[in-house]
Image: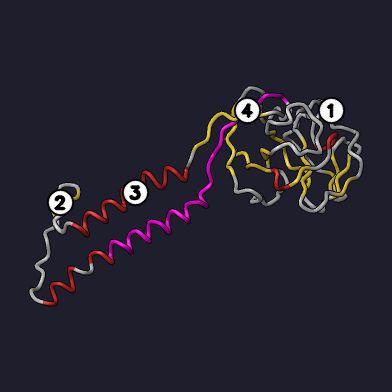
Amino acid sequence: MVLVDVRSIGSKAYFVVDVLVPLFLRSSMMWSNPSYTFRSITVPAPAWPTGGTAGMIRGVRKPALVIGLLVALAACASCAEVPRNKTYQVGSPSMEPTIAEGSTITAEVLEPGGYQPRRGDIVVFDVPDTWDAEGQDQPRVYRVAAVPGDTISCCDPQGRIVRNGTAVDEPYLARTGATPAEIQPFTVPADELYLLGDNRGVANDSAQLGPVPVTNVIGVVKR
């Protein structure tokens, strides 16, 4: 299933611009101006003591400003872990009926190599070089049918795929009776995934083209 990237929602940028920057500016203004007005409430300047003690207390302002800046920078570093969402338009019926052709999906984009394999996830991924397929430069979306170490084959007498010796119920599949018979017993290598479309009759997936490296996963579709 070929996807078209529609837009990207930058949670990190929002967090920095709309949260951290105003917070830092307000904190800075309060330290540099003891009578800073915040929401129509005036904070009066403290009665600073005279002599050497007064100079010592006033000197606290600059270190506090530096500390505030360091806290803001630390928060920026941590916000790098905040996931961002990316929206794609679906260009084929390979994941029907779960995802209709022409619809849009939103994926939670992960850091490179950050995907933890889980059966049943619907993932957006870059097409590996081992796939000789049309639309090679466009990301695709399929379901994780097997993770590293799993053995998958097709089919049991009811037409279900078999994973690690157990038939798998997949109520989300298109009811075409077209689960591909060409899935020979296959053990998924380390650091790879076996991905299948929900519309097995038309999907050009791991059953025909082989596994996909875990590192090719861009994100997980939000449902």
Between tags 4 and 2, which lies in front? 4
Label drawn at residue 177: 1
Mark linked to residue 41: 2
State the image quarter where residue 89 is shown.
top right
Vertical position of residue 107 compared to residue 46: above or below: above
Residue placed farthest to the bottom in the image? 52
Query: Which mark lies nearer to you, 2 or 1?
Result: 2
Could you tell me which residue is drawn at 87 percent across and 32 percent down? 180
From the image, which quarter does the N terminus lie in?
top right
Q: Is residue 16 left or right of residue 132?
A: left
Disc nearer the start of the sequence (3/4): 4
Tell me: 62 left or right of 179. left
The boundaries of the magenta stretch are 64-93
Q: Are marks 3 and 4 in contact (CB under 8 Å)?
A: no
Q: Is residue 130 left or right of residue 56?
A: right
> Do residues under tags 3 and 1 come within 8 Å of each other at their CB atoms?
no
Q: Amino acid at mark 3?
A: Val
**Amino acid type assigned to the residue bearing label 4 in the image:** Val
Residue 17 location, x and y as percent?
A: 38, 44
Give the residue at mark 4.
4
- Residue 81 forms part of the magenta stretch: yes
- Amino acid under disc 2: Ile
